[in-house]
């Protein structure tokens, strides 16, 4: 299923253009921690992403069950009760880079809901000829994605979720 989705993603960005950069090992970390309580933080190091350098189109795909927490029980609760990863197995982002402002605008789909995100500041580096490193951070609200936090734990989870990403994209030959 992941391969099929990747193929669709690549077709959607027009694979025949020459300046395509790709990774299957991108990293996304999110944190919804509250001071004085256990850290609520997870990382996914197997995110697929593609950048069309010609037109700035960018897309990323993260499988929800690939997010890892320090606490296995927290990971289980995340997948079963919050992300409902059996029903919503992936998160996607599709957007366009704005090179003048070093930002990206696009749409994030998570938990079956799509939200527009604007002016996400990004850092782009090209340490080697065929490599682009793209990094950034943005914040979303749990309520934007219709995720219900039970009252009993509502003081232990932040409504604001900070999302960090890093993609080391390699030019497709």
Image (tube, helix red, strand yellow):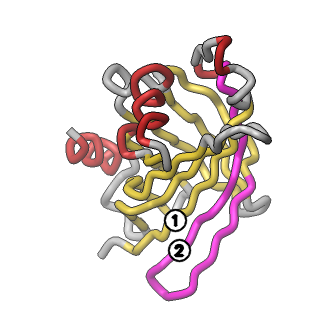
The foreground one among 121 and 30 is 30
Q: What stretch is highlighted in magenta?
A: 121-143
Residue displayed at 38% across by 69% down: 18
Total label count? 2
Magenta portion: prevailing SS class: strand
Residue 101 vs residue 136, the one in the foreground? 136
Q: Name the residue under label 1.
A: 53
Which residue carries the number 2 mark?
132
Percent across and percent down for residue 74 are 49, 35
Q: Position of residue 85 (x, y in %)?
A: 37, 27
- The quarter of the picture where the N terminus appears is top left
Magenta residue check for 60:
no
Helix, strand or loop status at disc 1: loop
Rendered residue at 46%/38% (across/down): 92
Residues at discs 2 and 1 in contact (Cβ within 8 Å): yes
Q: Classify 25 as above or below 29.
A: below
Residue at the spot x=65%, y=14% of the render? 152
Measured in 3D between alpha carbons, the distance from the residue under mark 2 to the one under mark 1, in whole angstroms, is 10 Å
């Amino acid at each position: 299923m992941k391969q099929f989705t990747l193929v669709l993603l690549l077709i959607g960005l027009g694979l025949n253009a020459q300046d395509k950069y790709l990774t299957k090992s991108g990293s996304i970390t999110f944190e919804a921690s509250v001071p004085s309580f256990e850290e609520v933080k997870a990382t996914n190091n197997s995110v697929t992403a593609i950048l069309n350098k010609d037109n700035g189109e960018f897309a990323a795909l993260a499988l929800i069950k690939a997010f890892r927490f320090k606490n296995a029980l927290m990971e289980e609760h995340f997948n079963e009760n919050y992300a409902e990863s059996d029903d919503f197995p992936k998160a996607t982002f599709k957007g366009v880079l704005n090179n003048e402002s070093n930002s990206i605008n696009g749409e994030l789909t998570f938990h079956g809901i799509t939200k527009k995100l604007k002016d996400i500041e990004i850092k782009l580096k090209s340490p080697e000829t065929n490599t682009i490193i793209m990094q950034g951070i943005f914040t979303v609200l749990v309520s934007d994605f219709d995720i219900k936090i039970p009252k009993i734990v509502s003081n232990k989870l932040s409504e604001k979720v900070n999302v960090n990403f890093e993609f080391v994209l390699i030019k497709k030959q």
